[in-house]
Image (spheres, rainbow, N blue to C red):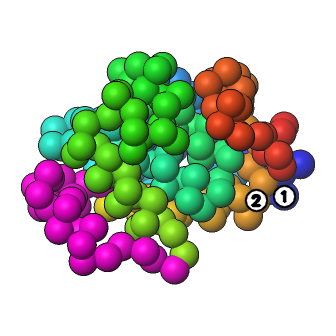
Amino acid sequence: MSRLEPLPIDLHAALSERFAFFEKTLGFVPNSLLTMQRKPKLVDAFIQFSAAVYDPEGEVDLGFKRLVAHVASSAAGCQYCKAHTAVSAKRHGIPVEKLEDVWNYRNSEHYSEAERVALDFALAAASQPNDVTDELFQSLKAHWSEEAIVEMLAVIGLFGFFNRWNDSLATPLEAEPLETAEEHLSKSGWQVGKHLS
């Protein structure tokens, strides 16, 4: 049960253009933002940041950024965000086999060495305490440009906020991410838990 209920999508007309960004990229407006709109300026700033993190002109593939977010959210234990990143990864071209094999990325044929190192980085950077070592960072730099590293770390930072927001509020999970997670993530231990609406 949600600790703060999502507010109606049309509550603040000024946010309609901002919400359109998520309708375009995710297919719906997340309940997390509908809850956040109690402070419209926060929603506005947050969506601007999200749009910058997911800039289609970036170096890192948009679908792979969602897998980075997925692994970071797993480190934080946020089932809501794991479901959302699964939906978004599929929407941005990640094959189902690759998504379902995300927790076997170190040995999976679906992941390149560069992707393996990036997901190791996501896991380490999202861990508490932070587990990024100099050795891991050197491996990351061997495969990715500094600009790409900044892009991936921005994803991890964005989801650090989302993970804490959604777990603290027990944000109710929407139908599409719930269905996707049950279909593709339950084999790896995903459960809706407190995010059941």
Camera-side residue: 82 or 117?
117
User: Please, is residue 172 above or below residue 90 in the view?
Assistant: below
Residue 3: name its quadrant: bottom right
Please provide percent x and percent y for residue 129. 52, 80
Which residue range is magenta in the image? 129-152
Spatial separation of the CA atoms under disc 2 and disc 1? 5 Å
* Residue pictured at 32% horizontal, 34% vertical: 111
Q: Secondary structure at mark 2?
A: helix
**Is residue 154 visible to the viewer in this orientation of the structure?**
no
Q: Label 1: how many residues lie within 10 Å, few (<14), some (14-19) or many (20+)?
A: some
Q: Position of residue 8 (x, y in %)?
A: 72, 38
Which of 150 and 123 lies nearest the eye of the viewer? 123
Question: Is residue 82 magenta-colored?
Answer: no
Q: Is residue 142 left or right of residue 54?
A: left
Query: Mark 2 vs mark 1: which is more N-terminal?
Result: 1
Q: Which mark is residue 169?
A: 2
Q: x%, y% of residue 187?
A: 68, 30
Q: Is residue 132 magenta?
A: yes
Residue 114 location, quadrant: top left
Residue lying at 83% horizontally and 49% vertically, measured from the top left: 194
Is 91 drawn above or below residue 2 in the view shown?
above
The reply to whether discs 2 and 1 touch (Cβ–Cβ < 8 Å) is: yes
Q: Amino acid at mark 2?
A: Leu
Residue 42 picture location, percent across and down: 52, 62
- Label 1, on which residue? 3
Does residue 78 sit above or below 134 in this rendering?
above
